[in-house]
Amino acid sequence: MTDTRALRDAFGAFLTGVTVVTAVNGEGAPIGFTANSFTSVSLDPPLLLVCLAKTSRNLPTLMAVTGFGVNVLSEGQKNVSNTFARPVEDRFAAVEWKEGPHGSPVFNDAAAWFDCSVHERIDAGDHVVMIGRVEAFDNSGKTGLGYARGGYFTPALTENKLLANVDGAVEIGAVVERDGQILLVPSKLGGWTLPFFDKPDVAQPALEPLMVEQLGVNVRSGLLYSVYDDSETGQHRVVYRAALGDGQPEIGRMFPLSQLPLEDVPNPAVRDLLKRYAQESTLNEFGIYFGNQEKGRVHAVANRG
Ligand SMILES: Cc1cc2nc3c(=O)[nH]c(=O)nc-3n(C[C@H](O)[C@H](O)[C@H](O)COP(=O)(O)O)c2cc1C
């Protein structure tokens, strides 16, 4: 039997863009959902595809329509992606849109849109592959929004800008290590996660008092380890490496790096971060991850002075 979560994580290693697939339902109302399973298929005839989960509430509509739209989101449209992936009542309130030439909703600020007729539907496991024939399209030239390993990335942002942009909802966290063991705390979703704290600014010295206050442990915080946007929590996350002082944390448990309970870590970004940390610790060569979730680059620490 396949381990579906491990398979989903592995599929998530493929860097994609993000689209919102749209259509008009039987009552004439616009519908849409976020999809990163978009692929261009053919130039002549002009075909594209997107895979629709059979669990989607929009399945009946999309099985009935004669056309659908695909909006390639631009890098400023992370909120649009989140809105169209969540059970929001009026998803279209989050975006400026108009009716495309072939009748499906198209977004004004998209990087590109394609207004399609349905070419073919292929039943494929727990999804339906929707192949569309492009009847009209527009390409704004805007940079697309990227997605990998459950998180967004924006190719135009440099590292410095990325850090400077970390405002709004920020969580600061740490991989806290002592003698080859790492501190994990109970996750709200069940299982384990890293300690994260709400933090309005990302100054690294803030971590130490937060750890004392909330976990009852002394830590010495070290280098930056990862900066990413977590699509599961909607948070910017800044993760440092930290060394645990004497004593036992009041919350959580220490796990040996070789026996991290990865299958009990519900958040895919944290799971991948822990995997990377465990791997790097065997070589004692830590990188700093910049980007969003696991896109971006891991820099050798030595290169950063
Ligand atoms: C980045 C991202 C990519 C997604 N890609 C797909 C996809 O390709 N196909 C799909 O069916 N759902 C995909 N989803 C999930 C749907 O957007 C989500 O389940 C949505 O709530 C479905 O809405 P609906 O049930 O109203 O159709 C994706 C979600 C995100 C955040």
Image (spheres, rainbow, N blue to C red):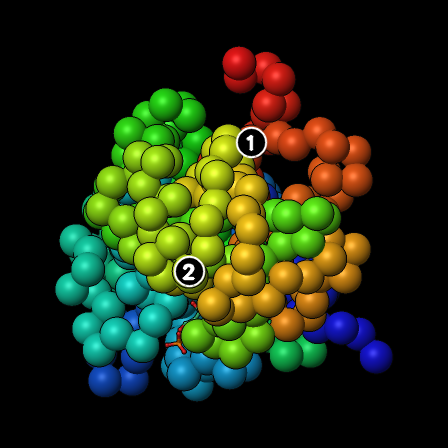
Which residue is at 63% across, 79% downward? 126
Camera-side residue of 37 and 245: 245
* Residue named by callout 1: 288
* Structural crowding at the residue carrying mark 2, measured as other residues with C-alpha within 10 Å and reported as few (<14), some (14–19) or many (≥20): some
Left/right of residue 103 with respect to residue 20 in the rendered view: left
Residue lying farthest right? 1
The spot of residue 214 in percent (x, y) is 36, 61
* Structural crowding at the residue carrying mark 1, measured as other residues with C-alpha within 10 Å and reported as few (<14), some (14–19) or many (≥20): many
Location of the N terminus (image quadrant): bottom right
Answer with mark 2 or mark 1, whichever residue precedes in sequence.
2
Residue lying farthest front? 246
| Residue 302 found in image quarter | top right
Q: Quadrant of ligand 1?
A: bottom left
**Residue type (three-letter) at the residue carrying disc 1:** Ile
| Residue 3 found in image quarter | bottom right
**Residue type (three-letter) at the residue carrying disc 2:** Gly
Camera-side residue of 224 and 145: 224
Left/right of residue 228 with respect to residue 263 in the rendered view: left
Choose mark 2 or mark 1, whichever is in front: 2
On screen, residue 191 above or below 201: below
Which residue is at 57% across, 75% downward? 191
* Residue named by callout 2: 216
> Label 1's element?
strand
